Image: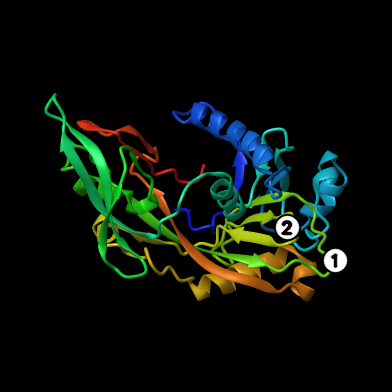
Amino acid sequence: AAASGKGGGVMARSWGDGGDTQGLHHVAFDMYGDLCEKLGVGSYRRLPVLSVSPGKGGLNRARKSNLSQFLPEWLDGNVGPIQCMGTGDDTAQVTPKEFVEKMIASSDIDVVLGVGTGVSTDPTADDGRKITGVRYTGRSDGAEEILPCDTVVVSAGPWSCMVEEWFGGVISAPMEGVKSTSVVWKAPEDGAVDATALFCGEDDRFGTHLEVYPRPDGSIYLCGIGGSDYVQKGELMQGAYREQCDANESRVTAASKAFREMSASYKKSGELEKVQACMRPCPPDAKPYMGAIPGYEGAYVNAGHNCW
């Protein structure tokens, strides 16, 4: 979620089948598996995924069916009908923060923290421009500097709409930012949490549609909390929520109540470890911007990858 480290990290190879992003789903899913093995990412694993509706009686029915093999022990409260969405053949997860840190550690690169403000260019023989650097203000002193380079990839989540200004309007990148709250439950004392992810139906009692992702460290990540704020391009161009993105406490309360309704175990002894929020980038047609920027040698954009 805009490289915040606060994303959920569940992926599915086939859930984009039949759409324009089918190939991207397939390539990305396979690439994550290969890279995580190569980099030694401990949080990557295949896992089953269930669809869970609000209500009562669903667990008893599921325990008498072939779904019983996928039911996690912590799903021991009140739920409605349960269906299988994936058995782990094409569904997996990774903790985004660990993956990014392992990528950086394995690369011979220097990470520079700051806010990009534009690019520097030189003219080319064909009346175009070529990249010579990225302009930015350093996080430590706020001074504007230029980072020399011959290639730039703009991949700045919802704030990637800045490419319109950076490249003189040769590319249009309408964007909406979705500011969403998520929470992480502490691992139980024994650290054991069954690896089954849940996608839950709309629960009108709490205004939630929870997505429940248990992680290998024993924590459980929740999103789909509802009550997201929609931030328009004009605000994003001004840097809205770029430096600070706080959780909506009312949605934290709603999510906690909804999850405890589903899990008697967590209703009895569950504790929250993190309360957070992040911004998702959403182009109007829900398709990412990917490719070369016209008229600029060495300039690319790769942004707007909303979930699913």
> Label 1 to label 2, Cα distance in Å?
25 Å
Q: Count up the numbered dots.
A: 2
Q: Quadrant of residue 31?
A: top right
Residue extending farthest top = 126
Q: Are marks 1 and 2 in contact (CB under 8 Å)?
A: no
Q: Nearer the viewer, residue 189 or 307?
A: 189
User: Which residue is disc 2 drawn over?
Assistant: 79
**Residue count near mark 2 (Cα–Cα under 10 Å), binned few <14, some 14–19, many ≥20:** many
Q: Nearer the viewer, residue 240 or 140?
A: 140
- The residue type indicated by label 2 comes to Val
SS for callout 1: loop
Q: Say if residue 135 shows up in the picture.
A: yes
Instruction: Determine the residue positioned at 24% across, 51% down.
Output: 118
Left or right: residue 137 versus residue 213 is left
Q: Say if residue 13 shows up in the picture.
A: no
**Residue count near mark 1 (Cα–Cα under 10 Å), binned few <14, some 14–19, many ≥20:** few
x and y percentages locating residue 173 in the rendered image: 27, 43
Q: What numbered label is drawn on residue 232?
A: none
Mark found first going from the N terminus, 1 or 2:
2
Instruction: Determine the residue positioned at 50% across, 62% down.
Output: 226
User: Which residue is disc 1 drawn over?
Assistant: 190
x and y percentages locating residue 34 in the rendered image: 64, 34
